[in-house]
Image (spheres, grey):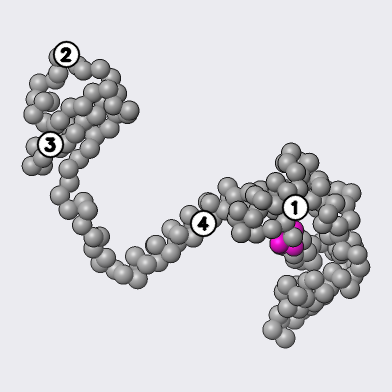
Amino acid sequence: MGMMDLARQYGASFKRPPVLELSGKPIRKLEPGLPNACELRFEQDRNRLLLNLRGADAPYAQHNRLVFEACIKRAKTEVKALVRLESFSAKTEDLLLQLIRKQADWTNASSILEQACEVFGISRSALHRRLQKENTNFQSVFSRVRLEEAKRLLVQDGRSLSDIGDLLGFSSLSVFSRFFYEQVGISPSRYRAAQQGDIRLSA
């Protein structure tokens, strides 16, 4: 039995014996040497071995502070990314992107909001409440999706700016261009040229 072997192995290394918790009922006949190797607790919620390690609660020695801080920063970034993947706003973004790329029959944010509610099976107010809990709103999510899709189309697609604006639900090229400029700081045409290497973004 693996846990008992571990208990016997580590038991002699500590002043206080480890605790072996078992979910089963008390064992009538124990293996030789096991009672002295650890403290047994039966009928617990789960099987586990608790080791009484000296210094386990002591502060971690940072031998290389720069590396330590870099690792912590990377870990926090990955945790945030994992949390975001499970967020309702991320799921809403994915859905809106699918609706746009399928070129669904919609002409404004209100129309695509109705489709999103229908897919999620919730009301408008419920969708707004769930987004508000994540400190955002539908218009912000919708704008973010349209901007990222506009960037993709400008670089990867040969459509005209008017066609891209129509595809993304803007009423006119001027409205699309103004939206893009407010978000990125340059016009759609300059962004496309810059990404294709014709000019620099800072030019």
Query: Which residue is at the far top?
Result: 28
User: What's the residue type where badge 1 is placed?
Assistant: Leu
**Mark 2, other Cα within 10 Å: few <14 / some 14–19 / many ≥20:** few
Give the mark nearest the N terminus, 1 or 4: 4
- Up the image or down, 191 lies above or below 131; here it is below
Residue marked by disc 2: 28
Dot 2: what SS? loop
* Quarter containing the N terminus: top left
User: Image quadrant of residue 109?
Assistant: bottom right
At x 14%, y 20%, the residue is 31
Relative to 7, 192 lies left or right: right
User: What's the residue type where badge 2 is placed?
Assistant: Arg
Residue marked by disc 3: 17
**Which residue range is magenta in the image?**
140-144
User: What's the residue type where badge 4 is placed?
Assistant: Lys
Dot 1: what SS? helix
At x 12%, y 36%, the residue is 17
Frontmost residue, 203 versus 100? 100
Residue marked by disc 1: 97
Dot 3: what SS? loop
